[in-house]
Image (spheres, rainbow, N blue to C red):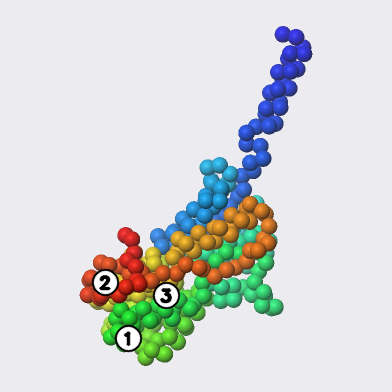
Amino acid sequence: MTRISIFFIVGVLFFNACHSPTEGKKHLKVGFLDAFQDETIEEAKKGFFKALEEKGFDPKTNIQVVYKNAQGSIPTLNQEINYLLDQNLDILATNTTLATISSAQRTQTLPIFMMVSPSPQSAGLLDKKGMSPKNLFGVYESLSYIDTSIILLKQLKPSVKTLGAIYSQGEPQSLEAYQHLSDRCKALNIDLISLPVNNSSETQLVVQTLLNKHLDAFFALPDNSVFASFETILKSCNEAQVPIFTSEEGLVKRGALAAFGPDIFEWGHQAGIQAAQFLKTHSTKGLGPEIVRIRKKVYNAKVASQFHISIPQGISPVKE
C-alpha cells in the first residue's frame, strides 16, 4: 500500500469520526422535579413529556432527562434542587407548589416551567414591583374553580349543611384555597368544619376527628397532604358514609364522588408545550406564566351508586 493510500484512508476515517451521525444533535438536558410521589400528580408529568414528544423531543434521541423526587420531604427537596442546579440543565420543570416555590427562590436564571402550582402572586413570588420572576414560566391555577366546585356539591347533594376539610399550614396554595372555600361556604350557609395538618401522617387522626362532628360531606382541597394520604381519607369517609368532593379529576378516579377542576394530564401537557417552544427557539419571547385552560366536571359512577346520588347531564364519568 502506497503512502498516499494510507494518508487517504486515515483522512477518510478522521472525516467520518468528525462528522458522525450524531453531530449537531446536542442532547438538551431537561430537569424534572416532583415534590412527592402520587398517582394523581404523576399525570402532570405524563402530560408534560407527552407534549415534548409531540414537539420532537424524546429521551431516546435528543434530550436527557434528569428526574428527582423529594418524596414529600422539605430537606430532600432542597437537596434535589441543589443537585439539579449543578447539572447544567437547559430547563427545569417543577411539579406542585413546593417544588415551584423552592426552585424559583434558588435560581433567577434557569428557565422554570411549573405545573400543578398556584399563580406567582399566590405563591408569594412577586418582587417589590409586583413582577413575577423573569425565569418562571409554565401553567398555574386560580381559585375560581372552587366557586363552581361548591355549586356542583350543592347540585349533587342539596341537603349538605356541614362540610369537612383539612389544609396544610405550610402550603400557600392550600391556605388560599381553604380561605376561598370558607368564603364560599359562608355565602351558601354551609358550616365548614376544618382542621390543619402538618404532614400526611396526621391526616387519619385529623379526618376522624372531623368525621366525629357528623359531616354531610368532605372537600378534598388541592393540598400535598391530601394527595399523599387520599386513600386513608377515603377509607375513613367511606366508613362514615360521607362522600368526598374535590377539584381534582385524579382524586375522583381514586374514589371521590365528583370534581370540578383542571385536568391534571392536560395541565402538564400545557406546560410541556411552553417548554418545547423554549427548547426549539432558546428564546422566552411570548412565554410567561399562564392559567390552566382545560377544566372538567367529572364524577365516579361507582361512588355515585354507592351514595345513591343521581348525576345530571353535563357531568362526565371518569375513565377507570
Q: Which residue is mark 1?
A: 162
Q: Which residue is mark 3?
A: 221
* Identity of the residue furthest to the top in this view: 1
Rendered residue at 75%/9% (across/down) = 2
Q: CA separation, marks 2 and 1?
A: 19 Å
Q: Nearer the viewer, residue 258 or 225?
A: 258
Q: Quadrant of residue 6?
A: top right
Q: Quadrant of residue 148?
A: bottom left
Q: Is residue 15 above or below residue 189?
A: above
Rendered residue at 63%/52% (across/down) = 280
Q: How many marks?
A: 3
Residue type pointed to by label 3:
Leu
Name the quarter where the C terminus is drawn: bottom left
Percent across and percent down for residue 36 are 46, 62
Rendered image: mark on residue 92: none
Q: Is residue 311 among what the camera can see?
A: yes
Rendered image: mark on residue 304: 2
Percent across and percent down for residue 210 are 33, 81
- With 212 as the anchor, is 116 left or right in this view? right
Q: CA separation, marks 1 and 3?
A: 16 Å
Residue type pointed to by label 1:
Thr
Q: Residues within 10 Å of mark 3 (few under 14, many from 20)?
A: many
